[in-house]
Amino acid sequence: MASVKLNNIKKRFGDVDVLHGIDLDIKDGEFVVLIGESGCGKSTLLRLLSGLEDITEGDLYIDDERVNGRSPAKRGIAMVFQSYALYPHMNVFKNMAFGLKISGKDKAFVNNKVMEAAKKLKIDHLLERLPRELSGGQRQRVAIGRAIVRDPKVFLFDEPLSNLDASLRVQTRVELGKLHQELKATVVYVTHDQVEAMTLGDKIVVMNKGRVEQVGAPLDLYHHPKTQFVAGFIGSPKMNFLKAKISQSGAENTQLVLESGRVIEASVDTSSLNQGDIVQLGMRPEHMALNCESNIVEGKVTLIEHLGELSYLYVDIGQEGEMVLKVDGDNQHQAGDKITFGIQPNRLYLFDHQGKALTRVNAHTSAAILL
Amino acid sequence: MKLLNRFIPSSGMRQVPKSVTVHAVLLAYTVIALFPIIVVVINAFKERRAIFRDPLDLPDSDSFTLVGFQQVLLRSDFGLYSWNSLVVTILAVGLVLLLGAMAAWALTEYKFKGNLLITFLFAMGIMIPIRLGTVSILSLMVNLDLVNTLTALVLVYIAQGLPLAVYILSEFVRTIPKELTEAARCDSVSEYKIFFCVILPLLKPAMATVAVFTMIPIWNDLWFPLILAPGEETRTITLGVQQFVGQYVTDWNSVLSALTLAIVPVLILYTIFSRQLIRGLTSGAVK
């Protein structure tokens, strides 16, 4: 196992800058998730780490050794691909043993390694089968098994769960989490699914347009997003954003006016801004409550999505548009109902015109849903 | 085409008229294609007079004879000719497949200077018939002291078959998912091993196709054996048969018998490759 250090890593394809200088420290045994929208450069970054793509500029260290320009094999990495990339003409055993055999390990050693990994992944009864005779989940395990047998310093996962169906994805996700605890391996994991990121990652790296937007522990990103992009990206359903004008700035309390003239109180430090400045007001769907007394907003329910234990209410609040509320699954509201809801001032987020988060005062960081 | 049509699954009842038409066309084509071969085979077993009297009749008790086969097997070096043909065909096809697959892999997988130029040259090779260069090929072979050797034929046939092989195999190489080679690279497999252990097995069905396309013209060729290797020791079967075709008298029994015998090895080779082709097509469900 090993630590990984990225120092101002840049990647250019022809004239196109894909990565604009990435700095990142990954500790030994850490599970790091790279997340971002498609095209943000997260997969490219993973390929740079693997050595399948050349680094244009910057330094990459694995275990304090500079590995720029080294082949994937010499970096001691193992990669699991989205499409599994199993060798179609080899059975499961051969797929897993191929790399070891090529590197000249003796037969008994290879057998032991493969059996051990197969048992760990519960695929030891499938060793004779060809990849095409396996289900998606089984193929995924074989792909992971192929990575495990090589005892790599760093595991690289490229959206490994996105080809699986929903229930299998959850199951495999849990197993991946357990596997990581067991192996205590350093993992870099690329996904666009924020649930995977939140549940698996020790550390999440949110990327946007070839730059690192924010690095932090999952709950850290959830409670203290540094930018509007991160705030919108982490959390499901997405944070609601409304345009607001500052009517009274302050170090502890800020008064805002929405387009419709509604007044909102937020416990955010806006001393750097002036009265009349435009900001984005952020409200998480799970933080708005039907029985909350502060910052009351009224609106009409346009759609309800029932998920069982909770429901999403889509509420038309007039001029400002539509908002999403996460409410208890037992609530009896129907589409067309007029409702009022509110949100506590210390649950609010404000972002300036550049999308930077303004400091929250007495931020409420209990994740409990206010129902 | 004949081969491919065998694999088109029979469609529903709605398409009966269409399938009748398709089968009628295919049947007609098959009859036209097989007719000369059948005429050759049935007449090989007939007496000379019967051949001319009723060329389309099947041999009966009166006209049946094996004299042609006796002539061929006893009076000429039929064994040697077949052996020469077999050696040339197998070596040429084998090397075309190996070199073609390597070139196809290199040209599609690696970016290097001159890549486009080489691809272009191969494309030209498909378009320009190799026989246009016969004179220079002959003088080259004379200079290399390779006239009247099977090596000369093998070399020429490799040159003849390679362009199309590279073209077809390149298309197949492109369909192999990139992740497979990347996974192999992460598995610390060397580039040679990637080619031989990962790519080549996946190219099998394509190589069977190429083998069939390459093999038939080589086996049947008369031109280059006549020019480059007409010596008694290096005659191929098509050339060997010619000794029965005289300027004034032609020993039709022997010619037809020799041709009938010449069909057998190529039929066996074809069966082997087409089996592989079928297996390749049905097991090609690669994710």
Image: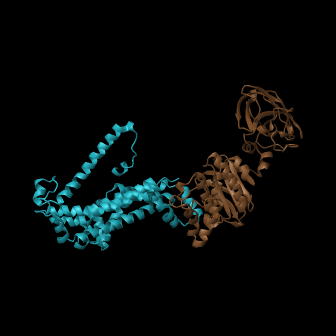
Chain colours: A brown, B cyan
Q: How many numbered marks does the figure carry?
A: 0
Nearer-the-camera pick, A195 or B220? A195
Above or below, A228 relative to B216: above
Q: Is residue A340 left or right of residue A194?
A: right
Tell me if I can see residue A191 in this picture: no
Point 11% across, 57% down: residue: B50
Q: Position of residue B205 (x, y in %)?
A: 42, 57
Indicate the position of residue A220 as horizontal and vertical percent values: 79, 49
Residue A342 falls left or right of residue B245: right
Given residues A192 and A209, the one toward you in this image is: A192
Q: Is residue B128 visible?
A: yes
Q: Residue at x 73, y 50 (%)?
A: A199
State which quadrant residue A182 falls in. Answer: bottom right
Q: Position of residue B186 (x, y in %)?
A: 60, 62
Point out residue B223 in the picture as x, y percentages from the top left corner: 25, 62
Question: Residue B276 occupies which quadrant of the picture?
Answer: bottom left
Is B17 on the left-hand or right-hand side of A269?
A: left
Compare residues A265 and B67 and report the one nearer the observer: B67
